[in-house]
Image (spheres, coloured by chain):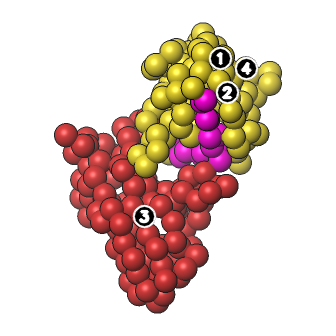
Amino acid sequence: AQSVTQPDARVTVSEGASLQLRCKYSYSGTPYLFWYVQYPRQGLQLLLKYYSGDPVVQGVNGFEAEFSKSNSSFHLRKASVHWSDSAVYFCVLSPLTSGGNYKPTFGKGTSLVVHP
Amino acid sequence: EAAVTQSPRNKVAVTGGKVTLSCNQTNNHNNMYWYRQDTGHGLRLIHYSYGAGSTEKGDIPDGYKASRPSQENFSLILELATPSQTSVYFCASGLGDTQYFGPGTRLLVL
């Protein structure tokens, strides 16, 4: 079984502050991990993904995430947020199945509110 | 050009009626997915497909059917709609591990 937990339903920060959105996963095999963002009244867009190698991966718009196997985590970070980063962020686990395809599992999402 | 489109964008249906949500992709991706998004639940996988003619049950398939008649099209069918199926539905296509999402369909079942 696979699962994703985003413990914070809502995070509020001031513009210019640093940000960390938390994600914990449960999966016995090799995790393929993603962060997607959903802006108001839109579909989801890929921010970044991790397969293997360097545990810190860079994404779009200054976002990065760090994978930790020992902690089963994949936290998203940004050094300085902008009001336009206000959105819902989803952590996704999508491992390769025995059939050679991917079956994704989404976290419940974290709503980020950036105050100007 | 939007690569994943959904129709209709908004739908009001009556309880017990049949609803068909359509998804079209021009990415030529093998994989397609249907999700519903509800407050407090995130996105939950209903059905998915790895190619034309194939459909697989996701995590919450009850009350839904899916059809993949071609590479480009993937439909979600509610044979007997219920108010509990009121939600926002997203379609996505994927080649390998990355998904590309449509804009969503808001469904209200009265």
- The image shows residue A29, relative to residue A50, as above or below, that is below
Callout 4 secondary element = strand
Compare marks 4 and 2 and give the one earlier in the sequence: 2
Q: Mark 2 points at which residue?
A: A13
Q: Give me the disc on residue A68.
A: 4
Is residue B31 visible in this depiction of the protein? no
Q: Name the residue under label 3.
A: B106
Same chain assignment for discs 3 and 4: no
Going by the numbered disc 3, the residue's amino acid type is Arg
A101 or B75: which is nearer to us?
A: B75
Q: Specify the subunit that label 2 lies on.
A: A
Q: Chain B is drawn in which colour?
A: red
Q: Give me the disc on residue A17.
A: 1
Query: Alpha carbon of mark 3 to alpha carbon of mark 4: how far?
Result: 37 Å
Query: Alpha carbon of mark 2 to alpha carbon of mark 3: how far?
Result: 30 Å
Please tell me whether mark 4 or mark 1 is closer to you in this view: 1
Callout 2 secondary element = strand
Compare marks 4 and 1 and give the one earlier in the sequence: 1
In the image, is residue A111 part of the stretch drawn in magenta?
yes
Going by the numbered disc 2, the residue's amino acid type is Val
Same chain assignment for discs 3 and 1: no
**Residue drawn 51% across the image and 66% down it:** B87
Going by the numbered disc 4, the residue's amino acid type is Ser
- Residue furthest toward the top? A54
Callout 1 secondary element = loop
Give the x, y percent position of residue A42. Answer: 41, 46
Please tell me whether mark 3 or mark 1 is closer to you in this view: 1
Give the x, y percent position of residue A88. Answer: 56, 40
A116 or A60: which is nearer to us?
A: A116
